[in-house]
Amino acid sequence: MTTLPVYTWRLAPDGLATRRQLRAAGLRPGGQDVVAQVERPRYRRGPLVAFLYRIELARPVRPMTPAKAAALAKANAARRTCPRCSTDAGYVIPASLGMCVPCAYPDEQHAA
């Protein structure tokens, strides 16, 4: 097993990019292996690590199909629908509450 080269934050050589950087350029890793990693130091915790891929081996992002777009819209609608009152809250229901804010705190809504 070979170890990956480690670069300090913002000092990686040209031609390498993180997944986010590839995505911003309309690319994806395309099955290639990680070639290096970059580390950003953090106070009181271990370093923040991001893996780097070669840009020249990256492939274009696959286009969104109508079926994928419909499935994504359906999933996002489910995340906004309150299970108690069955209305679209207009925001993603917090997992900590499990329902929309008016259903979770009915007494506080009448006081305001």
Image (cartoon, rainbow, N blue to C red):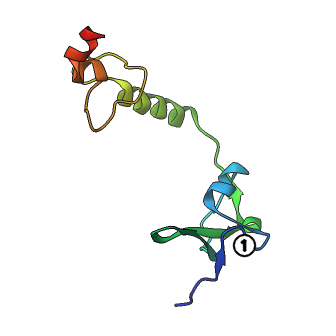
Disc 1 crowd rating (10 Å Cα; few below 14, some 14-19, many 20+) is some
**Quarter holding residue 86:** top left
Residue at the far bottom in the pictured view = 1
Q: Check the image and report above or below for 93 versus 102.
A: below
**Quarter holding residue 66:** top right
Q: Position of residue 48 (x, y in %)?
A: 53, 67
User: Is 73 on the left-hand or right-hand side of 18?
Assistant: left
Which image quarter is the C terminus in? top left
Say which element carries label 1: loop
Residue at the far right in the pictured view = 14
Name the foreground residue: 78 vs 102. 102
Q: Residue at x 47, y 29 (%)?
A: 73
The count of marks equals 1
User: Is 111 on the left-hand or right-hand side of 90?
Assistant: left
Q: Position of residue 85 (x, y in %)?
A: 24, 16
Name the foreground residue: 34 vs 46. 46
Q: Position of residue 84 (x, y in %)?
A: 21, 21
Report the residue marked by disc 1: 12
Q: Residue at x 33, y 23 (%)?
A: 81
**Quarter holding residue 91:** top left
User: Is 101 on the left-hand or right-hand side of 42?
Assistant: left
Give the amino acid at mark 1.
Ala
Q: Residue at x 30, y 38 (%)?
A: 95
Q: Position of residue 4 (x, y in %)?
A: 59, 83
Q: Residue at x 25, y 10 (%)?
A: 111
Q: Check the image and report above or below for 2 versus 71.
A: below
Name the foreground residue: 52 vs 62. 52
